[in-house]
Image (spheres, grey):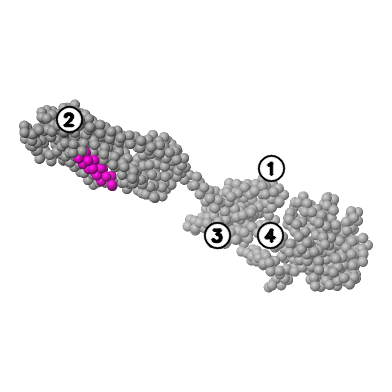
Amino acid sequence: MTLEERCVFKLLTCLTTQHDLRLVLVASAVCLAGCFTTFRLYSRMRGARGVVRAAWLLLTGLVAGSSVWATHFIAMVAFTPGLKTGYSPTGTLLSLMIAALFMASGFAVASAQRSTTNDFAGGVLIGLGVAAMHYMGMSAFVTQGQLVWEHATVGMSAVLGVGGATAALLLAGTARTIRRQAVGGGMLCLGIVMLHFTGMSAITIVPDASLTVPDQLLSGGMLTLAVGSITSMIILGGLGAVAIESQTSRSALERIRRLANAAYEGLVVVQSGRINDANAAFCDLVGAPLAELVGRPLFGEILTFDEADPSREDVRREGRLRPLVGGREIPVEVFSRLMDDGARVETSGLTVLAVRDLRERRAAEEKIRYLAEHDGLTGLLNRNSLQMRLAAAIDRVEASGESLAVICIDLDHFKEANDQHGHLAGDALLVETARRLQSAVQAPSFAARLGGDEFIVVQIAGGDQPAVAAELAGRLIEMLAAPVPFDGQELAMGSSLGVSLYPDDGRTAEALMANADMALYRAKESGRGVYRFFKREMDDTIRERRNLARDLRQGIADNELIVHYQPLARAADGEVCGFEALVRWKHPTRGMIPPLDFIPVAEENGLIEALGDWVLRRACADAAAWEKPLRIAVNLSPIQLHNPALPTLVHEVLITTGLSPSRLELEITESALFKDYQRALDNLRRLKALGVRIAMDDFGTGFSSLSTLQSFPFDKIKIDKSFVENIHRHDRATAIVRAVLGLGRSLEIPVVAEGVETEEQILFLRGEDCAELQGYAIGRPAPVDALTMWTTAGDPGAIAPKSKTRRSA
């Protein structure tokens, strides 16, 4: 018979013939309850720190030691060798201390670091502790005989104890679940029981009548009572501590869960790649309750990343979350951190992931990107995007051999609609223009808005140019000619187009756009509502006008402009009664530039308002310095007339210069009124309220509507020089002049005749009761320094009629 077979035979014989099996079952139950409680305490110890950890460790060692101790001595009471027995109190208590010390040490080593080595070392200490307690307890056993030990069986019992303890720690792991705690407790219990009964089978009692059992030794009954009481209290105390701590943990966990559920971000706890726990936000993202998620694989099935190793600590990465029930993948941002679960954090396998829904942020980023590349009102590409897209289109046609045309579009009636009906009407025109342009072009062609009422269409086509571009330009003009409904009425709409072709008119985006703009300028000059292709010969002309506009803008800033004054005289006696301010430009290199050359440039380039304001200030300042209180007449451009700030500006100029309002006379043309009739009349009434005089200039050349004279009480009417210079030359002109003078007398509005150049004209006008005269027969425009003969108080300022005709220079 082998050693193993002999040990098993002796174990079974000892257990069945020398033990009370009822007490053996009691000992086993005590051992199992104690070991289970031990692993419950062990799981709490692993999640604690500092003093709390030490307290849990002490309680774990005490419960484990007392369980082993109780198992041993209850099993010893079940041992019936047929002789009188007793137990030494000293050895009994010492065995309890040894058991508690070894148990605490073993569990401390096992929980120091999450590794197999620590579990194995802890299991060895616990197994040796069980063996040490057993054989120290056996030393307290006293009977009427000699104990003979079989050392091989003793060694076998120690191996069984160490093996059971080691297996218990390895199988229990972190002992976080009841199942793991039960497995660990059951394995440790099996090791303890196997060690005890194998150790008991290693002894043989040789009766010796000379030996006695002292009466002061503990009897079996007393020992059973003591062991049972002490062990029960310790085990119940341990279970009570676990219950209290569990309740506290549950309360804390519930508070944490409420906080986690209140979080905007999804929170999920992952262990070994599977979902351990999650908050309400994560469940909502996935579209499933927590009970359905626990235990499911997270990575790959629900959450995917572009990178591997998604559980690295403190790493931010983006991925996609796939809802369990339908729905599109959700872009998410994930932050991960290893969860602190006690002493062995680095290998616990618990990871907390914060999952942030990126849909709103992506939508906001997309909107920002869209607004950066598109016009906010029309949705077309903006200027910056146009440059990039046009450059890319040039690269494309170079490679593909397609044709490319740049069409610059300007709305003909946009400003009128904006001024007459307000900005909402202007916006409606722009939006409708964009819609029509988008419907007219198809990818890869595209449309863009440069700003204001300027648009660009880039045509990429396979046909021959310029035929393809001409066809599209004609279609665009036709589409943009249809009126736009707005607020119960139809707004007039039209467009002018300029076209440049690649590569004939430019090989870069800048050149193509500049040349298309020049062609647009020529289309506007042609009467609007047409398209024009860029021609090389127009380049120099347009460039010259643009250079002139640039110089004019600088000239206004550098005070290159000067004001000349042309006298006005009373027809009755020839006395000078005022002057008209006429602007001149003395260019530093071109010399004196006449108004007919630079005034249209100022109007085209938005400089006329700044120019008019400057003339008004200069003329008022000069007139305020004259000794005689002569009137000063200043022309207003249509843009100035419709500016709501005009009355405020005039008031501020009068205060600044100190000129009396009655000396200022503002001249307007009748045609300027009809751009926005009501606004113009409102401004004129406010100017009249300041005391300023209002004159209608060039009467007879515009609409000459009598309703205008009825709507507003003008202080003066000026007959255009085209009629005056033909007095006695053409009967119709003479009749018109006579009729206007009669109209003025009837309405009691003084009439001024412009362009008077001969004595014959003076005598005719005086005979027809004309109020004032202006022209070369009275005086030529001159700088302010040349006016002293009329503006000085001692000079009568009369003009002698001259018989010689004076022609304009």
Q: Which of marks 4 and 3 is in front?
A: 4
Q: How far apart are marks 1 and 4 (CA)?
A: 30 Å
What's under tag 2, amino acid-wise?
Gly
Q: Do the residues labelled 4 and 2 touch (CB within 8 Å)?
A: no
What's under tag 4, amino acid-wise?
Gly
Secondary structure category for the residue under label 2: helix
- Name the chief secondary structure element in magenta: helix
> Which residue was labeled with disc 4?
606
> Which residue was labeled with disc 3?
509
Whether residue 214 is visible: yes
Q: Within 10 angstroms of label 1, few (less than 14), some, or many (20 or more) residues?
A: few
Secondary structure category for the residue under label 3: helix
Residue 58 falls inside the magenta stretch? no
Q: Which residues lie in the magenta part?
A: 94-113
Where does residue 652 sit, x and y in percent of width and height? 76, 60
The disc label shown at residue 593, or none: none
> Which residue was labeled with disc 1?
487
Which callout, 1 or 4, points at the residue further toward the start of the chain? 1
Q: Are marks 1 and 3 in contact (CB under 8 Å)?
A: no
Can you name the residue that lies furthest to the right here?
767
The disc label shown at residue 220, or none: 2
Q: How far apart are marks 2 and 1 (CA)?
A: 110 Å
Q: Which of marks 1 and 3 is in front?
A: 1
What's under tag 3, amino acid-wise?
Ala
Q: Distance between the residues labelled 4 and 3?
A: 26 Å
Note whether 486 is above or below 19 in the view shown: below
Quadrant in which residue 469 is drawn = bottom right
Where does residue 405 sit, x and y in percent of width and height? 56, 56
